[in-house]
Each structure stands twice: as structure tokens, then as C-alpha cells.
Amino acid sequence: MTLLSIKNVSKSFSNKKIIEGLSLTVEEGEFVSIIGPSGSGKSTLFHLIGGIISPDEGRIELNGRTINGQRGSISYMPQAPSLLPWRTILQNVLLGQELQGHKDTEKAVQMIEKAGLKEYIHSYPSQLSGGMKQRVSFIRALLSPQPVICLDEPFSALDELTRLDMQKWLLSIWDEYRKTILFVTHNIDEALFLSDRIVLLSSGPASIMDEFILPFKRPRHEEILLTNEFLDWKRNIHKSFKNS
């Protein structure tokens, strides 16, 4: 079932067109990664979906309802964890639910414990490593009641080993809850490892240049990263990206 529809959306700033005629659908429970050159409008697209800004043309629909310029319809996780320093880890995790007028403390505690952060549940963000903060931020997004989570390069600041650990952890959590995810990344390996589908944006103004439906079965394990099939897909996407 189609959950999110972006229909012929365009957006300009100071007479410079950032996004032009972009259309995209995302199915319920689908994990879609978006790859594009720097400045291609990926973050602008997330701001449009999140209602921070409104499109100049076109419609954005969630469950068939137009949400142009409406905030609070999706859950958003930026590159930085954006945790409130004066709130404990548990309080940060519950923030999205509190803003909607309810909270499930028991479920939040269970997810924090599953993330390996049981001993930090009443700690503050300053006491956590970068990877731990990202786990907390993702749990907060996952617990929020909105049906779509937009993740904007959440692992870009992490070292390679921590990044792979976070990717594996994200997949393990996502496999259990299967929330719909839109994921922005510059990393082709990351997109291949995580996604059901990869959308390639052209350089600005952004439009969809290519899409790749991935054949890899779930659950996925890191061994897939070194298979010939994975490397073939990486070469194909890199070639298409290079020709954009």
C-alpha cells in the first residue's frame, strides 16, 4: 500500500530552482534510500515532506491526505543526534510521544535496553559516545507515532567500524518494527546494505534520474558486503551516479 506520495513537486529559493517536477511514491514498511550529489536538494526534499517549507508546485500526500506545509506528519532524524542536554536518555526517547500527548515508558525502556544502553537510561547525552547518541535519536524517532521516518545521513560523522555496527543495529531494529523509512546517504555501500530500493537524484535542480530495486533477501548480514552480486550492484549504481 502506498503510504507517501510526492507528486510533481518543485521548489525554488531566490529564483534558483532546487527541485523540479519530482515524483516519488513510498510503500508502507519500505526502506528507501536517496542518493544524490551535494547540493542536489536532498535535505530540501526532507524539509518539504516534514512541512518545514511548502512546495511551489505539486502535492505531498500521506495516506492519501495532502500535507503540504503541515508539520508533525513525519518523524525526522537529522545528521546530529539533536538530543536535549538537560533531559535524561529516557526523557529524550519519550519526547516525540510527549509532543503528541501520550507516552509509553515501558516500551521505551525495553527499546533502550535492547540497544545496549540499560545502564545509561537515566544518564545525560554528554555521558554517551557518538554511536550511543545516534541509537537514542533513532529510538526516539521509532517511538514517535508518525508512520514515516526520514533519516538524513545519520551515520556520516561516525568512523567506519562504528558506522557498520550502527547499520547492523538499525537493520535489526527495523526488521522487528518495519516502519517506513526514507534514508539520505552519500554512501552507496550503506544504501545497498540497508535498502529495499535506491532512488538516484540528478544534480540540481533535483529530479529522479534512476531507481534500483534491490534483490537482497532479509535479514541481511555483513557478509553480503563482499559478495560478487553486491559488488556488481555497487558498480552499476556508481556508473549511473557518475553519469548524472
Image: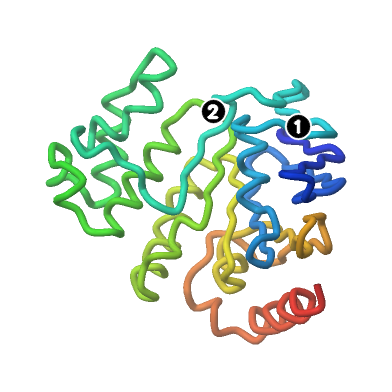
Where residue 37 appears, x then y in whole percent? 68, 67
Residue 54 lies in what quarter of the image? Answer: top right
- Looking at the image, residue 239 sits to the left or right of residue 130; the answer is right
Q: In this view, does 195 lie to the left or right of 173?
A: right
Locate the C terminus by quadrant.
bottom right
At 12% from the left edge and 46% from the top edge, which residue is drawn?
A: 119
- Disc 1 or disc 2, which is closer to the eye? 1
Which residue is identified by label 1? 60
Does dot 2 land on a helix, a strand or a loop?
Answer: loop
* Residue at horizontal 36 percent and vertical 73 percent from the top: 159
User: Of label 1 and label 2, which has the lower sequence position?
Assistant: 1
Residue most extreme to the front: 14
Marks 1 and 2, how far apart at CA: 15 Å
In the image, residue 182 sits, relative to residue 203, either above or below, namely above
Q: Is 42 located above or below residue 192 in the figure?
A: above
Name the kind of residue labelled 1 in the image. Ile
Which type of secondary structure does the marked residue at label 1 adopt?
Answer: strand
| Residue 47 vs residue 133, the one in the foreground | 47
**Residue beneath disc 2:** 146
